[in-house]
Amino acid sequence: MRLPQEIIRDKRDGRALSEADIAGFIEGLVQDQVTEGQAAAFAMAVFFRGLCLDERVALTRAMTHSGTVLAWDLPGPVLDKHSTGGVGDTVSLPLAAMVAACGGYVPMISGRGLGHTGGTLDKLASIPGYDVAPGLDRFRHVTTEAGCAIIGQTADLAPADRRLYAIRDVTGTVESLDLITASILSKKLAAGLQGLVMDVKTGSGAFMAGRAEARALAESIVTVANAAGLRTRALVTDMDAPLASCAGNAVEVAYAVDYLTGRAREPHFHAVTLALAAEMLVIGRLAADVAQAEERLTAALESGRACEVFSRMVAALGGPSDFVEATDRYLPRVPVVRPVMAQASGVVESIETRAIGLAVIGLGGGRTRPQDTIDPGVGFTGLVGRGARLETGDPIGVVHAANNAAAERAETALRDAFRIGVTAPAACEPVKDRLG
Ligand code: URA
């Protein structure tokens, strides 16, 4: 390999790097021959200078092959969905089971909460006994037997991303489109996928709040993934309000179970879930088109097959075998549960969604330091949506808190997040763009 400092200089001065340079740098990073300072300088140079398509593909490939790359021999396509993160985004739980119930296999590596967004991993960790960090053998076994397994990132898959991500996190280099693309895709390619659907969020609760930025990220991921041999489509979806009418960990698991059993299926959440799952079936050639895919997915929900798959996955990963039947018995509760009242009458004009995510963290449902433990029972339920008409004293949501002081802080934050006025907002499209 050329010296790391020579590679950094080239990128700093805006020159394109060769595939060999990028592969060498990443290998050096994993083998501790590239220092943390060099990796940080490299990330900053990429942040300012960017990577061309060939460089992005090379970086993605190098990070993919920095550890184990799974290979599957299954009777159906191996598919996944990845979201850029949001609030009340508990789509992965029902979606994995729905796609598995239609013949796909979904080995889903999910993350912890990041910034103001909730993490699928933290949600599942609120199920007693559920093993979010099984070895690769158990991961394979559960995926094969249940059709899906949702677990956390393992040390074996894409270790270069784990190292680089930790450095980016503390050096102001997370928000690089090129680095985000390679980071997400290296983990997906290492999981041995045959098809991926990206859910790129846009709106007040998204990292890429602007529609143009979200579209640019979606385009980058689709282009690089397809160039690296992974069939990928991306949907840009609405995150201008919490996706579910709740936000937290256990409360979102309960919501997902209600969705699967049919006890409650909110239209906006359903539209996004169905759209993403349908793209997965089409990419996996399990349906000829989106319309047929949606029919199959609806049948899997209505017949209860998707719910059975979820129940099998939970039990196979160590959770209770009757979790779906007795969810309330198993999920953690908190002592203070009380409604938050509107202090004015009018219509909900907009929602500062990011603030709701931050309020969940304030309640203890997310982390402010990586080593923090979270309180799985806290959060909000019963959140009203944009356009809801309210009288003074009507509830805008219900807070679940560990104590009265935390509940009061969360109530204030929730009230501040809702702009109540006189103008009804325009109807909002759940899916704003489709790419790939
Ligand atoms: N999620 C990832 O996995 N990587 C990033 O760089 C950003 C979000």
Image (cartoon, rainbow, N blue to C red):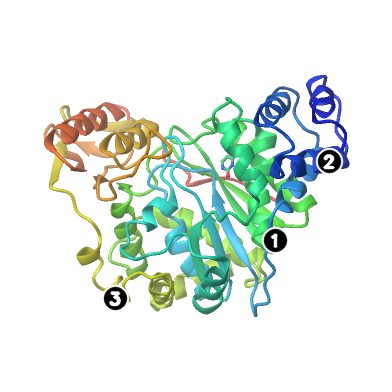
Residue bearing mark 1: 69
Tell me if 310 is positioned left or right of 212 in this view.
left
What amino acid does circle 3 point to?
A: Asp
Mark 2 / mark 1, whichever is N-terminal: 2
Q: How many angstroms separate mark 3 from mark 1 (CA)? A: 34 Å
Which quadrant of the structure image shows residue 164? top right
Q: How many angstroms separate mark 3 from mark 2 (CA)? A: 49 Å
Q: How many angstroms separate mark 2 from mark 1 (CA)? A: 21 Å
Residue 187 screen position, x and y as percent: 63, 52
Q: Quadrant of the N terminus?
A: top right
What amino acid does circle 2 point to?
A: Asp
What crowding class fits label 1: few (fewer than 14 Cα within 10 Å), some (14-19), or many (20 or more)? some
Q: Residue drawn at (23%, 30%), measured in percent from left and top?
A: 415
Q: Residue drawn at (79%, 26%), measured in percent from left and top?
A: 8
Q: Is residue 141 visible?
A: yes
Residue 368 screen position, x and y as percent: 38, 33
Residue 54 image label: 2
Q: Is residue 174 visible?
A: no
Residue 76 screen position, x and y as percent: 64, 76
**Helix, strand or loop under label 1:** loop
Residue 125 image label: none
Q: Residue drawn at (40%, 79%), measured in percent from left and top?
A: 303
What crowding class fits label 2: few (fewer than 14 Cα within 10 Å), some (14-19), or many (20 or more)? some
Depth check, mark 3 against mark 1: the one in front is: 1
Mark 3 / mark 1, whichever is N-terminal: 1
Q: Nearer the viewer, residue 272 or 317?
A: 317
Ligand 1, seen in the image, is in the quarter at top right
